[in-house]
Image: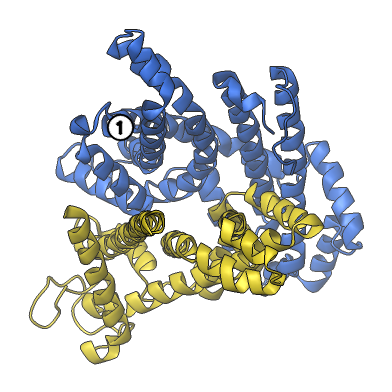
Chain colours: A yellow, B blue
Amino acid sequence: MIRRALAVASVAWLVLISLGALLAPLLSGTDPIQPVGPPLAAPSAGFGLGTDALGRDLLTRMLFGARFSLASGLLAASLAVGIGGVAGLAAAMHGGWIERAIVWAANAMLAIPGLLLALMLLTAMGPGVTTIVLAVGLGGAPGFARLARAAFLAARQSDFVRASHALGAGPRWVALRHVVPNAGTALLSLATTQFAWAFLGTTTLTFLGLAGNPSLPEWGAMLNEGRLHLIDAPHLALWPGAAITLTILSVQLLGNWITRRQAGADARRAAAQIGS
Amino acid sequence: MVSPSDRPAAGLLTAAGRRALDGLLTAWAAVSVTFFALRLAGGDPVASLLAQGLASSEQADALRHQLGLDLPLLQQYLRFLGGLLRGDLGRSLYTGQPVTRIIGQQIPYTAQLAAAGLFVALALGLVLGLLAAGEDRGRRFPLASGLAGIATALPVAFTGILAILAATRLGQVSVSDPATLRSLGLPALVLGFASAGAVARLMQAGMQETLAAPFMLAARARGLRRGPRLLWHALRPALPPVVSLIAIEAAFLFGGTVVTETVFSRPGLGRLLVGSILQGDFPVAQGLVVLSALVYTLSHVAADTLGLILDPRLRRTE
């Protein structure tokens, strides 16, 4: 019951911020970068959440911030899932030297923890939002490749794959028809985790001021700005901080819920097969 | 990757030696990845100096020559490895000081913070994990697992800000007083809390697995009391994953210190790294990444060895 309620609340929050991100220009008439009122104004009818140190509308910046934060998290996660997934599939299906090379490369890159790998790439490419997305995406790829390989291997070793092989199916057919769909749910929950990680990574890097553009309406950068006014205007840090936390928490809860549901479905399917 | 085989149980030293060799190879690989990624993606590290007007083009050429950037890539790589073996990581582009000295000055601050953070993470994580596992379902504490979940979701940046805010509201410290804020307590708590969630989860999962194992029933049948049963039979086999997590967390803590040091305006390696990236001080950033890769692999080898001591079953399979 509680789990279900939490899952519903998570979905509601994610839908809310996605809508906010998509409809930001419609929901707010003000510019997220230009000052529109007195600095550090308290929340009022004109400025729903008050204004920041430069007199910019905080609500507008939060809405546009959802755009930047969600988009960079999504892009970085897709990059990691795309590259890692393909590498993991290739390793699991081919075996032999291809698998060894991929596993070795992934392990070598994993010897540097993800955030540090991202920081290393930032060192190479210089600060910037695009660089952050690339860095977090590439930084997450080796870890995802390893997890994806494990998921694909597990699916490959199941009885129906052996049966399909025995019936004379080719490797590509087996990979696309049996292995990928059966690893799908495991991958889906891995991908949600990856998004949570990527979102945390991108907002952390922007929080550190590595976006290179301080006026950017982005939750991590806004949290960093709010840090300077903790005494006189704590809401400047609290809103973006709470938004980041809620998003990560929602994605994690959703991931857990998917995993649990799938475990239940698997058990039911197994029971049905035994019964028939 | 050697597949699990029917090889007979190796001795502790053989198994540990194999891990150490493995670690050495990984460290070399990580250092090489760092070097090539920086060279291939980085373009010209001297360009940022030129762009900022800090060097004339003749000076830039001289600097390139001095850094060996005009050499072929392979030769640069060999020079880099040779320097690394001698403990020479080059000099800062800005101050001209040796990178090893710049890094060495900051190590104590970060080491202190990381050690204190690790202590908090372990203490909090083990307690939460044990509470969440419980011996039977009726005695589980949903609060403990909930808190563990929240700990993994809260970004260090936000918990740090919340902690500062709470501390100033409670009147314990004021932001204008750097002496108290820079003291260790609050940053260590913030840093440790972030890792405590992962420790607790693993602890809980491990304990639940061992609690269900046949040897627990056997121990119960032999009439062992609850205390020894939990501590000796259930806790010990659940520890190796936690120990290897600590190795991962040690590296994560380094990432966490980057943020914690920024939030609390503490000096340290993390701030140095962010600063050198923003400045484009390439040798310093490279040195820091190399250092952390070495620390990371070293802590993995140490954790693996500790795991081998704790759980003899691990010695058998590769």
Residue A269 visible? The answer is yes
Above or below: residue B246 compared with residue A89: above
Q: Position of residue A46 (x, y in %)?
A: 11, 83
Q: Where is residue B117 in the image (x, y as percent from the top left)?
A: 41, 34
Residue lying at the far front of the rendered structure: A276
> Quick one: quadrant of the C terminus of chain B?
top right
Side of B248 where B297 appears, left or right: right
Question: Is residue A41 or residue B113 the one in the foreground?
Answer: B113
Question: Is residue A116 or residue A88 the one in the foreground?
Answer: A88
Q: Where is residue A29 in the image (x, y as percent from the top left)?
A: 22, 91
Q: Say which chain tag 1 marks.
A: B
Side of A101 where B158 appears, left or right: left
Above or below: residue B147 compared with residue B228: below
Question: Is residue B81 or residue B202 the one in the foreground?
Answer: B202
Label 1: few (<14), some or many (≥20) within 10 Å?
Answer: many
What type is the residue that disc 1 sits on? Ala
Side of B86 where B274 appears, left or right: left
Number of numbered callouts drawn? 1
The residue lying at 52 percent from left, 62 percent from top is A183
Read off the residue under disc 1.
Answer: B133
The residue lying at 42 percent from left, 72 percent from top is A214
Residue lying at the far left of the rendered structure: A45
The residue lying at 74 percent from left, 62 percent from top is A94
> Quick one: quadrant of the N terminus of chain B?
top right
* Secondary structure under the numbered disc 1 in the rendered image: helix
Residue A131 visible? The answer is no
The residue lying at 52 percent from left, 33 percent from top is B111
> Quadrant location of residue A26?
bottom left
Q: Where is residue A156 in the image (x, y as percent from the top left)?
A: 61, 59
